[in-house]
Image (cartoon, helix red, strand yellow):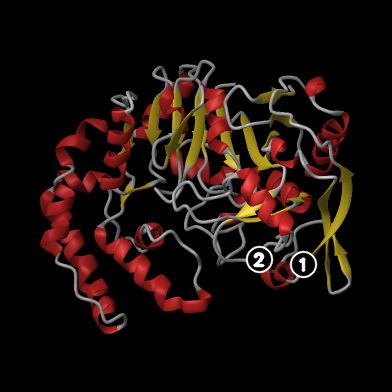
Amino acid sequence: MPAIVVLGAQWGDEGKGKATDLLGSSPLDYCVRTSGGNNAGHTIVVNGEKFDTHLLPSTILNPDCVPVIANGVVVDPAALFSEIDGFAARGVHVDNLVVSANAHLITSYHTTLDKVTERFLGKNLIGTTGRGIGPTYADKISRSGIRVADLFDEKILRQKIEAALDFKNQVLAKVYNRRAIDADQVVEELLSFVDRLRPMVADTSLLLNRALDDGKTVLFEGAQATMLDVDHGTYPFVTSSSPVSGGVCTGAGVGPTRIDRVIGVIKAYTTRVGSGPFPTELHDEDGEKLRTVGGEFGVTTGRPRRCGWYDAVIARYAARVNGLTEFCLTKLDVLGDWERIPVCVGYEIDGVRHDEMPMTQSEFHHAKPVYEFFDGWNSDISGARSFEDLPKNAQIYVRALEEMSGAPFWAVGVGPSREQTVVLR
């Protein structure tokens, strides 16, 4: 199947990087980021060595695979080249990286606005990373954004930045009591990246469609996750892009008929970062234990993640809105030290049972999890390489989750490394 989508089925941090890397270890021609920016983070562990990516696709360790940053991504050039240089210092070179001419650029005024706006919201903050993602997407939608192609026409670039700052400086000064941003400084900063960026830039939609026409294998890698989608997530506590499978098509410039396989990555429990409702969240010793054993701290921000039990309602929702062909279950090994493991199979809202996602955010905010309980296995499963290697209770847990989640399980992660994976089909 030449076109594969890998995306998050919860609130992010599910282990998409590992799933992408696992697929990328087999013959793969292109790996494509289609949304988000350097607010994302993927961790890959190969032969005991850990690599973190933020803008670069997770198959960056595969020299035979072309990494692509497509039009739906917002790009901070300084962050991009810092990441490239960091990999090069470790002997990983990404000379074949391709960047869309239509990708929007994060500028210094976007990051400034992101930070001051979040502080201004006080207790109503969204929990952004402060990296300018939201303001950049806002400019994109309001048709006042700066695209990569604009870097190659200084006159147009300057006109666009001056026009954007005419309004934004008024907001900074009169609403937030901040200093105005100098347009010349922004132009100079962006032009400093031109020579290095120019060889990477291409019409990535044309590139990818031709690759698919030629029978090449293309992996579309999601950032963030379903429950953070600006349309289908827990709005307004979401990201500013569309990380569901439909967003892959607009974010890469390929039609939906080109997609053959859609894999949702989902943890054996649930986490989220930032504000917003989270029905199975734990505020007790179990929550702290999941955080500690699972290493639940953000790859990009280092923030501790909120932790809770597996939520099958969210899994079914992700399967539905993404049209998932399968799931990749990760971090099963983290649950190896519990006597009983709860799984959320539905919600109770004002005394009424809901087996599917509530229609309104108000209802979801008041949802109380309905749990079923499974016996734990009290053993280290990190050495398992086949389903039969797993303890009986772990097998029962996996098959129960598969039955209630709305799509078959393709693989199960039993540790952070690439080889610590049980492939089911």
Give amino acid for label 2.
Answer: Pro
Residue 154 vs residue 332: left or right?
left
Image coordinates for residue 181, horizontal then vertical, percent: 18, 68
Residue situated in front as seen by the camera: 123 or 164:
123
Residue that appears at 31% across and 25% down: 93
Quarter of the image for residue 324 reads top right
Image coordinates for residue 409, horizontal then vertical, percent: 74, 32
Q: Does dot 2 land on a helix, a strand or a loop?
A: loop
Residue that appears at 20% across and 75% down: 179
| In the image, residue 108 above or below residue 26 | below
Q: Which residue is mark 2?
A: 277
- Image quadrant in which the N terminus is located: top right
Residue that appears at 22% across and 74% down: 169
Q: Are marks 1 and 2 in contact (CB under 8 Å)?
A: yes
Q: Which residue is mark 1?
A: 367
**Extreme bottom residue here?**
174
Q: Earlier in the sequence, mark 1 or mark 2?
A: 2
Gap between marks 1 and 2 measured at Cα = 9 Å
> How many labels sit on residues?
2
| In the image, residue 224 above or below residue 255 | below
Quarter of the image for residue 172 reads bottom left
Image coordinates for residue 411, horizontal then vertical, percent: 69, 28
